[in-house]
Image (cartoon, rainbow, N blue to C red):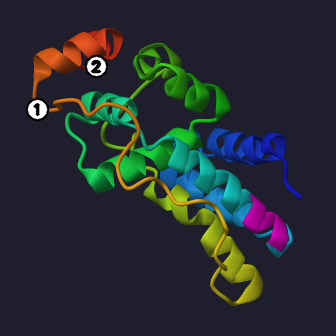
């Protein structure tokens, strides 16, 4: 049974080895997960999925919108994967206060950062390589149909600048 600490250790080790590149991080995760048994890979997938669902919030979507200069549904999905890939401190900090990403992120390059699509598939890929079959249903409660919290008017720059003063000042100001 993989605990939360082991989950974050895998995420962090892969990010550090990949020097922050989300695609390399995903490849390294697949490689490292492939050295575990299939049940541990499914545990990792459950940890990932539950955090991914926890991050389905309007306030976090607004922060992604500011950082990415706009974020569609898919872009926000990939942003949540990327956010998990940034490790526990950044992830939990962002959930606590999305505007704190301005302090938590050393750097943000729209070209490579903010899109962790491949990270979202790492456990599935590792499981398939190990077993030759598609991963079973994880039994994790699905994300709500709508993000949690109060919707924001993402098209209104004044609203975004007021809601995310630090992010706006650092990345858009």
Q: Residue at x 34, y 10 (%)?
A: 166
Mark seen at residue 37 = none
162 relative position to 10: left or right: left
Q: Is residue 40 on the magenta stretch?
A: yes
Quadrant hosting residue 140? bottom right
Q: Is residue 160 on the magenta stretch?
A: no
Report the Cα–Cα distance between label 1 and label 2. Answer: 17 Å
Vertical arrangement, residue 77 with respect to residue 142, above or below: above
Query: What is the x, y in percent for residue 94?
Result: 50, 26
Q: Secondary structure at mark 2?
A: helix
108 relative position to 104: left or right: left
Q: Which residue is mark 1?
A: 155
Q: Residue at x 34, y 28 (%)?
A: 63
Magenta region, residue range: 39-43
Quadrant hosting residue 42? bottom right
Residues packed near mark 1 inside 10 Å, few (<14), some (14 to 19) or many (20 plus): few
Vertical arrangement, residue 18 with respect to residue 100, above or below: below
**Of residues 36 and 157, the one drawn nearer to the viewer in this rendering:** 157
Query: What is the x, y in percent for residue 142?
Result: 52, 60
Mark seen at residue 171 = 2
Q: Secondary structure at mark 1?
A: loop
**Of residues 115 and 38, the one drawn nearer to the viewer in this rendering:** 38
């Amino acid at each position: 049974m993989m605990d939360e600490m082991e989950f974050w250790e895998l995420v962090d080790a892969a990010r550090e080895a990949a020097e922050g590149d989300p695609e390399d991080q995903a490849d390294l995760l697949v490689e490292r997960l492939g050295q575990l048994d299939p049940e541990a890979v499914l545990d990792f997938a459950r940890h990932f999925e539950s955090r991914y669902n926890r991050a389905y919030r309007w306030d976090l979507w607004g922060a992604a919108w500011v950082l990415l200069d706009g974020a569609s549904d898919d872009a926000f999905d990939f942003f949540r994967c990327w956010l998990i890939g940034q490790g526990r401190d950044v992830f939990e900090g962002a959930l606590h206060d999305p505007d704190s990403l301005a302090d938590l992120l050393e750097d943000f390059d729209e070209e490579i950062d903010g899109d962790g699509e491949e990270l979202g598939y790492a456990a599935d890929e590792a499981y398939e390589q190990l077993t030759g079959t598609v991963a079973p249903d994880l039994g994790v409660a699905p994300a709500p149909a709508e993000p949690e919290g109060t919707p924001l008017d993402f098209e209104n720059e004044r609203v975004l600048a007021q809601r995310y003063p630090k992010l706006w000042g650092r990345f858009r100001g």
